[in-house]
Structure formats: structure tokens, C-alpha cells
Amino acid sequence: MARMLSNLSERHRDRRIAELIAIVWLLSLADLVFTLWAHFFTAFHEMNPLANYMLHRNLIPSLILFKLVVTAVGTLIFWRLRHHGRAELALWGLAGVYVMLAVRWSAYTTVAMALP
């Protein structure tokens, strides 16, 4: 029985990995949009030192390109390692971190929009 469940889990891993990668891309792009919105419209301090450097020097296209390239490289690595259970576990962890970041952005925008 356990072997059958394990085989079932392995057969659907490609789909789960693809779905998790799509979630990571969606949340990563949302993070980028919120970062740019907060930079231009609120008193925002970016915690990522590299992104902070780019924002303060108005290197917006560079920041966008950096975010897209890092996300692409990272998700490509996960896709290539999709047959390894540890890679799937790490991708679940990354998706979880991005969900927590989205919750943080939700709280930030709620407060920012309430200010006069």
C-alpha cells in the first residue's frame, strides 16, 4: 500500500512542481509590483540591500531585470531538480515564504492606504 502511494506521489511530482513554480512566479511578480508601488508612493525602506541600492539610484529597469533573471534562474534549477523529493520540499518552503511576504505586503498596503 505504501509503495502504491509512493508511486502515485512520484507520478504527479512534475505537475506539483510546475504548479509551485507558477505560484512562485506569480508571487515574485506581485512582490516586484508592490516594491515599485511602495517606492514611488509611500515612505518605503527596502530591506534587500541590492534592491535598495538600485531603487535609491533610480535603476528601476535594472531592478526589474534583476528580479526576473533571479526568479528565472531559481525556478529553472527547481525544474531541473524536479525528480528529487528534497527539491520539491525546498520549493514548498520557498512558496511558503512568498505567501508570508504577500501577507506582509497586504498589511503594509492596508496601513499605507489609511494614511492621509
Image (cartoon, rainbow, N blue to C red):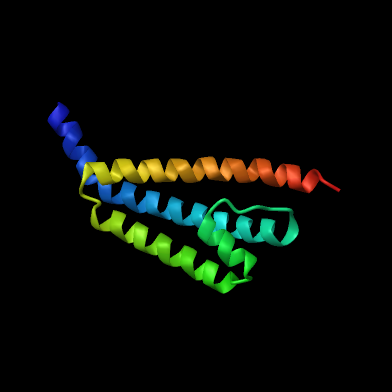
Give residue 26's position: percent from left, percent from top.
Answer: 50, 55
Q: Nearer the viewer, residue 4 or 99?
A: 99
Position of residue 92 in the picture relative to residue 36 (left or right): left
Give residue 107's position: percent from left, percent from top.
Answer: 66, 40
Position of residue 113 in the picture relative to residue 68 (left or right): right
Q: Pick out the residue farthest to the right.
A: 116
Residue at screen point 57% across, 66% down: 54
Residue at screen point 57% across, 50% down: 47
Position of residue 7 in the picture relative to residue 17 (left or right): left
Position of residue 44 in the picture relative to residue 46 (left or right): right
Give residue 72's position: percent from left, percent from top.
Answer: 39, 63
Q: Nearer the viewer, residue 11 or 36?
A: 36
* Count of number-bearing discs: 0
Q: Quadrant of residue 1?
A: top left
Q: Is residue 34 above or below residue 72?
A: above
Give residue 80's position: percent from left, percent from top.
Answer: 24, 58
Residue at screen point 74% across, 59% down: 41
Q: Quadrant of residue 30?
A: bottom right
Q: Nearer the viewer, residue 89 or 69?
A: 69
Q: Pick out the residue farthest to the top.
A: 1
Residue at screen point 32% across, 43% down: 90
Q: Is residue 58 above or below residue 38?
A: below
Q: Nearer the viewer, residue 45 or 9?
A: 45
